[in-house]
Image (cartoon, grey):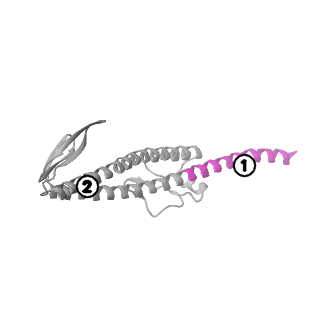
Amino acid sequence: MSSSSPSGSGGDDLSERRGIPAAKFIQDVETYLSQSGFDSNSALAFHQERLQQYKVVEMKLLAQQRDLQAKIPDIEKCLEVVATLEARKGTGESLLADFEVSEGIYSRACIEDTDSVCLWLGANVMLEYSCEEATSLLKNNLENAKASLEVLVADLQFLRDQVTVTQVTIARIYNYDVHQRRVKQVTPTAIAAADA
């Protein structure tokens, strides 16, 4: 989305948010076209391209949002498991648990007293942590995921506002172009009628 943006006669105070350029509201289409050097078709093409760029970014952000929304419950579930293991530490009771080995394949395990847990960090990496370290790490990951989700939601709202402004701008330019064509058609007809 690094293409240059022609300036409009109206606009927001915010020029971009995290690399997403702000769409400028066009108050006066005629002034906008004369200042930007565009004709109606070029301006329409520019704004339609910008709209498509917004749509691509929106799809990427929605995918990130889905990933984070799936990750947060997993982290919370891991925190619960670690808390359960810590609560049972020292009681002498073993914990009977079912865990997923592969998609749709589960195994039952008997977990004795333990001072550590293994956490998948991603990219086929697993590390062993003490229960306290694991709790700290998981809480930190949960806070980061929730903060990232909040930022992502704000980015999506900003993006939706830009899509709306761009769609309105496209409609205004199109309507201006239709009006100008009608005026050009009426003018020769009116001159011919006045001559007769």
At 14% from the left and 56% from the top, the residue drawn is 89
Would you say residue 178 sits in the magenta stretch?
Answer: yes
Image quarter of residue 149: bottom left
Label 2: element kind: helix
Label 1: element kind: helix
In front here: 65 or 104? 104
- Asked if the residue at tag 2 contacts the one at tag 1, i.e. Cβ–Cβ closer than 8 Å, the answer is no
**What residue does disc 2 label?**
80
Looking at the rendering, the stretch of residues picked out in magenta corresponds to 167-196
Q: Residue 40: x and y, percent?
A: 59, 46
At 20% from the left and 40% from the top, the residue drawn is 124
Q: Is residue 162 left or right of residue 41?
A: left
Q: Quadrant of the C terminus?
A: top right
In front here: 75 or 151? 75
Image quarter of residue 150: bottom left
In front here: 122 or 81? 81
Name the amino acid, label 2: Glu
The total of numbered circles placed on residues is 2
Which secondary structure is most common in the magenta stretch? helix
Q: Is residue 173 left or right of residue 159?
A: right
Name the amino acid, label 1: Val
Measured Cα–Cα span from mark 1 to mark 2? 71 Å
Q: Residue 162: x and y, percent?
A: 49, 54
* Lower sequence index among marks 1 and 2: 2
Q: Residue 165: x and y, percent?
A: 53, 55
At 45% from the left and 53% from the top, the residue drawn is 159
In front here: 78 or 39? 78
Q: Residue 50: x and y, percent?
A: 48, 47
**What residue does disc 1 label?**
183
